Image (spheres, grey):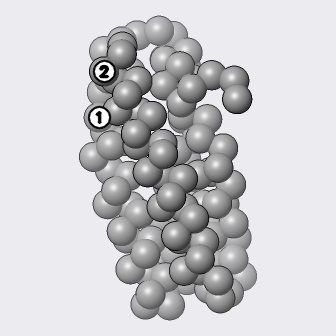
């Protein structure tokens, strides 16, 4: 499994606790909104917005080495780029599931820090 998501991020910011906590807070604040934006765009059949939001979300989850989240967001992004949102809802459900696990891990990592 390697490092947890918080260890990965802490390593990235050179062990700076303050920056680490700010980034965790920003992610926990922003990520649920992005997930909701992706869901709304999938439901609306708005491939361009799905592509943009999934790309941004992939980037922010990538800071935590959250591989399952990143892989699922990438798949959504690529399908949307091809204009194919069939299976988009199932992908979003998977994305949300992995994201919930990530949110829990980030919250836990903040407490421990």
Q: Which residue is mark 2?
A: 111
Q: Position of residue 82 (x, y in %)?
A: 72, 82
Secondary structure beneath label 2: helix
Q: Position of residue 101 (x, y in %)?
A: 48, 45
> To which quarter of the image does residue 35 belong?
bottom left
* Closer-to-camera residue (79/39): 39
Which residue appears at 30% of the width and 21% of the height?
A: 111
Q: Is residue 7 visible?
A: yes
How far is disc 1 from disc 2 in space, using C-alphas?
A: 12 Å
* Image: 72 above or below 40: above
Secondary structure beneath label 1: helix
Which residue appears at 60% of the width and 72% of the height?
A: 91
* Closer-to-camera residue (60/108): 108
* Image: 33 above or below 87: above
Q: Position of residue 96 (x, y in %)?
A: 48, 61
Tell me: 77 left or right of 16.
right
Q: Earlier in the sequence, mark 1 or mark 2?
A: 1
How packed mark 1 is, by other alpha carbons closer than 10 Å (few <14, some 14-19, many 20 or more), is some
Which residue appears at 55% of the width and 15% of the height?
A: 11
Say which quadrant the N terminus sits in. top right
Which residue appears at 60% of the width and 60% of the height?
A: 73
Label drawn at residue 25: 1
């Amino acid at each position: 499994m390697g490092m947890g998501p918080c260890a990965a991020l802490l390593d990235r910011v050179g062990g700076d606790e303050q920056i680490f906590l700010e980034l965790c807070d920003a992610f926990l604040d922003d990520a649920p909104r992005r997930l909701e934006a992706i869901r709304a765009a999938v439901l609306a059949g708005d491939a361009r917005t799905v592509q943009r939001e999934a790309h941004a979300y992939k980037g922010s989850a990538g800071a935590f080495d959250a591989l399952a989240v990143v892989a699922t967001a990438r798949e959504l992004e690529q399908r949307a780029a091809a204009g194919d949102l069939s299976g988009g809802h199932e992908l979003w459900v998977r994305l949300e599931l992995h994201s919930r696990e990530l949110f829990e891990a980030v919250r836990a990592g903040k407490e421990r820090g």
